[in-house]
Image (spheres, rainbow, N blue to C red):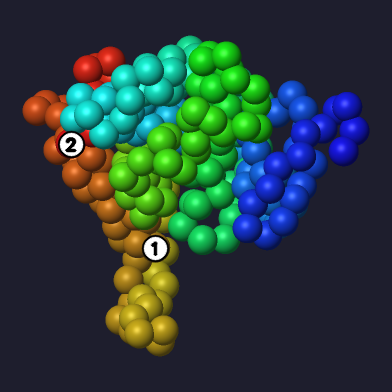
Amino acid sequence: MSPNTRSEKDPLGTLDVPADALYGVQTLRAVQNFPISGLKPLPAFVDATVRIKRAAALTHKETGRLDAKLADAIVKAADEVLSGQHRDQFVVDVYQAGAGTSHNMNINEVLANRANEILGAKRGTYTPVHPNDHVNMAQSTNDVIPTAIRLACLTELGKLEKAFDGLAREFEKKGKEFDDVLKSGRTHLQDAMPIRLGQELDAYAGSLRRSAIRSWSVSSSKPTGTRSINWSTCTAR
């Protein structure tokens, strides 16, 4: 271990983590195990996961399962991330094995280390706030990641709807352009009845339109391209 690193231990052994990192040994193992694309998690996905941790801390504080001092430190750490701080600490490749466990642990470790700093402790000590016992309390990857995906999609829905509308319009345009071009239809991986290429392109447009309509069901009216969610009042239930 050098002055630029700190030593952390997990069930697989000991690793030297960068001394200034808010993430820990589990995150570092994931970085080493999955050097695949170089792509880091989208900000919306980070935000969604952090909001889950924040809501869980508030809920466990309310029910008495989590000491109020620890819960408040986790919430403060989460608020820092949501305000745009510590973004360089989310370092696990988007392509990773499992169901997102490494991303979940990256978030847990960052919030735990920052919460401990807020309480006067050092990074890498994981006391009094532990990434598993406190930040991840009453959760698992199978709880967190599917929820985070849905929350992230909600916040990005306005952009997605705009993109879907543009793509559908282009398919409709091409559908008219190629409406007189005959081609073989395909079913069960075999040639089937002839159809017009324009019909096929119109079908793509229709599929996109129907998908957009399904997305509108999250609100009471047709969207205007944005979503407004009051995250400050959100707690886990």
Q: Which residue is mark 2?
A: 237
Nearest to the observer: residue 206 or residue 144: 144
Q: Residue 228's image quarter?
A: top left
Above or below for 41 versus 189:
above
Using the numbered discs, state the Cα–Cα distance from disc 1 to disc 2 in whole angstroms.
Answer: 50 Å
Q: Position of residue 152 (x, y in %)?
A: 38, 35
Residue for point 31% across, 30% down: 66
Q: Position of residue 16 (x, y in %)?
A: 79, 41
- For the N terminus, the quadrant is top right
Q: Secondary structure at mark 1?
A: helix
The disc label shown at residue 179, or none: none
- For the C terminus, the quadrant is top left
Residue for point 9% across, 28% down: 220
Mark 1 Cα within 10 Å, few/some/many (few <14, many 20+)?
many
Q: Which of pointers 1 and 2 lies earlier in the amino acid sequence?
A: 1
Nearest to the observer: residue 228 or residue 147: 147
Q: Residue 33's image quarter?
A: bottom right
Q: Which residue is mark 1?
A: 197
Q: Residue 39's image quarter?
A: top right
Q: Amino acid at mark 2?
A: Arg
